[in-house]
Image (cartoon, helix red, strand yellow):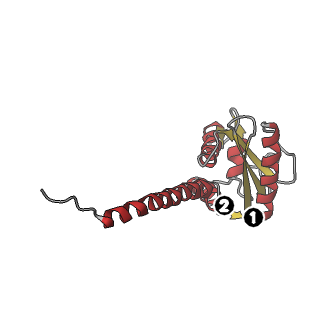
Amino acid sequence: GRPIRRDTNMASRMSLTTPTMGLAALVMSLAILHVGLAQNSPVQYLRLHNAARHAEGVGLGPLKWNDALAEYAQDYAEQLAKICTIEHSHGPYGENLYMGMTGPMAVENAMQMWMREKSDYDYDTNSCRRVCGHYTQLVWRDTKRVGCGYAECRHNSAGIVVCSYDPPGNMGDERPYLIST
């Protein structure tokens, strides 16, 4: 018979495969982490806010990201995460709060929840059937700047989103936006 031939190239390829696979796994993990972080980024918050404002079709201008508002919102989100509850700060800005699932979908879920309140807002009477203050703040015509923050509760799997708005909305008996007739 034929002698068994040892393929040294195969052995060297095998030794490269393990580190290469490890590197590939690391790159994939970082990509997933990057996607998660991008979901809670200023770009994500702005995209969702401005899409919601544009969808109203009443000429609401886009919001601009504001780092000071974002810092305020982030600090408050972290405070709330320590006690794992939400309550308004009663600070100088308009404010929307959300507590729900953690991770990259928290921002999307918060925006969906706030926008669902649209069905409870009656433009003709400028009143809410139930809760609609998050929606009206989101589409408040005079609001120009937004900053948001996100933190996770330590004791359970809840995520908290805080968005701060300037100038604040929901002022007196004013309508959030005007429909020209």
Amino acid at dot 2: Pro
Q: Residue 181, relative to residue 100: is it above or below?
A: below
Q: Where is 33 relative to 129, above or below?
A: below
Disc on res. 151 = none
- The residue identified by callout 1 is 66
Do callouts 1 and 2 mark residues in contact (Cβ within 8 Å)? no
Q: Is mark 1 on a helix, strand or loop?
A: loop
- Taking depth in this image into account, of 27 and 162 the one nearest to the observer is 27
Q: How crowded is mark 2: few (under 14 residues within 10 Å), some or many (20 or more)?
A: some
User: Residue pushed farthest bottom?
Assistant: 9
Place of residue 32 in the rendered image (x, y in percent of width and height, measured from the top left):
54, 54
Q: Is residue 154 left or right of residue 55?
A: right
Q: Which mark is residue 42?
A: 2
**Rendered image quadrant of residue 92:** bottom right
**Residue 83 higher or lower than 149, as above or below:** above
| Distance between mark 1 and mark 2 Cα atoms | 9 Å
Q: How many marks?
A: 2
Quadrant (top left, top right, bottom left, bottom right) of the N terminus: bottom left
Q: Which of marks 1 and 2 is in front?
A: 2
Dot 1 amino acid type = Asn
Identity of the residue drawn at 87% across and 50% down: 91
Measured along the vertical axis of the image, is residue 55 above or below residue 80? Answer: below
Please tell me which residue is depicted at 71% across the width and 53% down the height of the picture: 140
Q: Position of residue 11 (x, y in %)?
A: 35, 62
Query: To which quarter of the image does residue 67 belong?
Result: bottom right
The residue that appears at 60% across and 38% down in the rendered structure is 119
The C terminus sits in image quarter? bottom right
Q: Which residue, as the protein is rendered here, is positioned at the far right?
A: 91
Question: Looking at the picture, how far across and down is residue 117, in whole percent?
Answer: 64, 39
- Rendered location of residue 66, percent (x, y): 75, 64
Foreground of the two, 9 or 95: 9
